[in-house]
């Protein structure tokens, strides 16, 4: 997306202005700026337009002033010369569009039909003005037309007002809404710039709340479960009193969404060049979480898109065998992603080679997923930063899922999981910053927080894993402050070698940090270690464990995963609880 359009999308609203007198431009610009609305479209419906644009450009250099109702290439040239940063036209005039594209002018042409959208696409455009919005079908039209044109963004204009803008702004395919009620000719002619400031401020707030629904109070809810054998034998701590405050005995449902892949590895610790056969298993961050939760006796459901051929079915079967609900998996697309793993040993590092481009989930359309239906009855939604990195569509799917979950009062957790082979830090920051506005619990490590958000702590050496406790807390505090997370879980891996790692973790909540014990592990397979941590943290939260027990349980689960071959953590709740409670002897269980 064009840089200017990205800025417009962040603002979410474009006042459409008709000025009869350029002298009104300066006080109008001041009123809009005072409201926090730094974007406007000045229409070429009057002779004052060109001079008004010059006033905005000169006096408000950071303001996104655009020219609207541009009907000819000549008008476009005048507008840009006057200082306009983008062009808007009421219809799609091929001559105007071609001229702007060739001249490098950002243009948003008006459309109201599928044919006009395809004309815009033929010029390489991905953003169009839907005009006249209300008269031409409103939001229902945009939702319907987005299915065959998933990469198109819309700026609905015409009939938009304070009463209906929220529904448009909440839809992910709407870049911004054009409207004139806050800058009407009546308000401008009467010089009521204070009222313009007030109305503009209200409009911005409406858009902000539509895009970021308030978090439901008490979204993190404990649920009661039958106690396991180990829990029954365990201490009768005051956590046993939790059941008295629990509102429901219905087992919570956790939904995870992402890409499950085919994993191919040489046997043992052989190198790729030594292999004459490859072991086949399936795995993927969110799928690994779903399996772990199912192994803990929880109700888990996995959402993705997989080809309908036999390899796709084998992936489905790999989840079903552990009791994961696979009924929501969409079938279609041409291929499943593949990754090749060479396990490291001693001082030789592990290597991963991806072959996942154009996988079914990467090419899925947002319209493939009805999130209100998918999330019905769910208590928790989990995804990782790997999924939005797959494609623009995958990022849209994640954003829509998180928005819907938030609107339904469902807890949302995200493991940042930065993958440098999928996107750059700048790309990750831009996309994840938008999505994380809807996240309640963030799971990360020191490198993820740095690469995705540029958040670091002092006295930290990521490559060696040397991070003091103060540094852990500092990173978590910054993440919570930036996004309003209720909890942050951070893992630390100290790699003595590929074969021996130290493993520990921290949970930060309500201004306090809780640290797990440190485990020294002989690594059998480190893939899925972070996912097993995420699953155990979700389980512990839903079980109603207190923070210290949560982090102890999560750290123990991920420690055990390092002893299991394959992506899935094939350990039980009791086994994790035994280790979390201090029995790390590894003695034979008879």
Image (cartoon, rainbow, N blue to C red):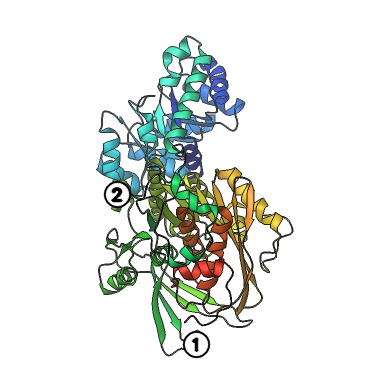
Crowdedness near tag 1: few (<14), some (14–19) or many (≥20) residues, C-alpha within 10 Å:
few
Q: Nearer the viewer, residue 340 or 415?
A: 415
Relative placement, left or right, of 421 versus 364 is: right
**Which x, y percent locates residue 394?**
40, 55
**Which x, y percent locates residue 48?**
48, 19
Query: In the rendered image, which residue does mark 2 sit on?
Result: 370
Point out the frontmost of discs 1 and 2.
2
Marker disc for residue 273 = 1
Q: Residue at x 43, y 44 (%)?
A: 101
Q: Quadrant of residue 160?
A: top left
**Which x, y percent locates residue 352?**
50, 74
**Nearer the N terminus, badge 1 or badge 2?**
1
Q: Quadrant of residue 358?
A: bottom left
In this rendering, the answer to whether 446 lies above or below 131 is below
Q: Nearer the viewer, residue 465 or 301?
A: 301
The Cα–Cα distance between marks 1 and 2, rounded to whole angstroms, is 45 Å
């Amino acid at each position: 997306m064009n840089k200017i359009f990205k800025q417009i999308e962040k603002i979410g609203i474009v006042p459409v202005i008709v000025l009869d007198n350029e002298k009104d431009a300066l006080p109008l610009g001041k009123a809009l700026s005072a409201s926090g609305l730094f974007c406007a479209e000045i229409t070429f419906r009057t002779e004052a337009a060109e001079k008004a644009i010059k006033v905005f450009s000169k006096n408000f250099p950071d303001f996104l002033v655009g020219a609207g109702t541009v009907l000819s290439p000549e008008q476009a040239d005048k507008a840009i010369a006057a200082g306009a940063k983008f062009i808007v036209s009421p219809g799609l005039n091929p001559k105007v569009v071609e001229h702007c594209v060739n001249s490098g002018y950002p243009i948003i042409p008006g459309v109201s039909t599928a044919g006009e959208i395809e004309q815009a696409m033929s010029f390489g455009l991905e953003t169009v003005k839907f005009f006249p919005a209300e008269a031409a079908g409103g939001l229902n039209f945009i939702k319907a037309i987005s299915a065959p044109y998933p990469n198109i963004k819309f700026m609905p204009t015409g009939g938009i007002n304070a009463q209906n803008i929220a529904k448009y702004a909440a839809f992910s395919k709407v870049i911004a809404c054009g409207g004139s009620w806050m800058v009407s000719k009546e308000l401008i002619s009467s010089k009521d710039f204070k009222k313009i400031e007030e109305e503009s401020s209200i409009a911005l707030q409406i858009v902000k709340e539509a895009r970021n629904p308030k978090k439901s109070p008490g979204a993190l809810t404990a649920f009661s479960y039958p106690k396991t054998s180990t829990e029954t034998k365990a201490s009768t701590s005051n956590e046993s009193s939790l059941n008295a405050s629990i509102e429901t005995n219905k087992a919570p449902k956790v939904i995870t969404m992402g890409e499950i892949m085919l994993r191919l590895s040489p046997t043992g610790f052989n190198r790729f060049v030594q292999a004459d056969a490859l072991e086949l298993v399936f795995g993927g961050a969110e799928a690994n979480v779903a399996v772990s939760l199912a192994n803990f006796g929880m109700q888990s459901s996995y959402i993705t898109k997989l080809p309908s051929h036999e390899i796709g079915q084998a992936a489905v079967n790999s989840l079903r065998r552990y009791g994961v609900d696979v009924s929501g998996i969409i079938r279609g697309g041409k291929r499943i992603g593949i990754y090749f793993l060479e396990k490291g040993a001693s001082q030789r590092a592990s290597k991963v080679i991806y072959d996942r481009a154009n996988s079914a989930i990467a090419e899925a359309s947002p319209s493939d997923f009805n999130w209100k239906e998918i999330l019905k009855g769910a208590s928790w939604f989990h995804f990782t930063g790997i999924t939005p990195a797959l494609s623009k569509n995958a990022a849209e799917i994640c954003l829509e899922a998180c928005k819907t979950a938030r609107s339904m009062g469902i807890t949302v957790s995200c493991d940042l999981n930065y993958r440098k082979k999928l996107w750059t830090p700048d790309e990750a920051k831009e996309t994840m910053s938008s999505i994380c506005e809807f996240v309640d619990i963030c799971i990360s490590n020191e490198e993820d927080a740095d690469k995705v958000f540029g958040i670091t702590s002092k006295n930290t050496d990521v490559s060696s894993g040397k991070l003091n406790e103060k540094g852990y807390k500092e990173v978590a505090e910054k993440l919570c402050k930036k996004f309003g997370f209720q909890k942050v879980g951070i893992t630390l891996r100290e790699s003595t070698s590929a074969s021996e790692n130290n493993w520990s973790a921290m949970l930060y909540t309500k201004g306090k940090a809780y640290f797990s014990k440190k485990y020294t592990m002989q690594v059998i397979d480190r893939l899925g270690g972070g996912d097993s941590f995420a699953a155990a943290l979700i389980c512990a939260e839903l079980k109603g464990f207190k923070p210290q027990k949560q982090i102890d349980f999560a750290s123990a689960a991920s420690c055990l995963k390092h002893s299991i071959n394959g992506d899935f953590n094939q350990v039980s709740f009791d086994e994790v609880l035994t280790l979390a409670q201090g029995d790390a002897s590894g003695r034979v269980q008879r």
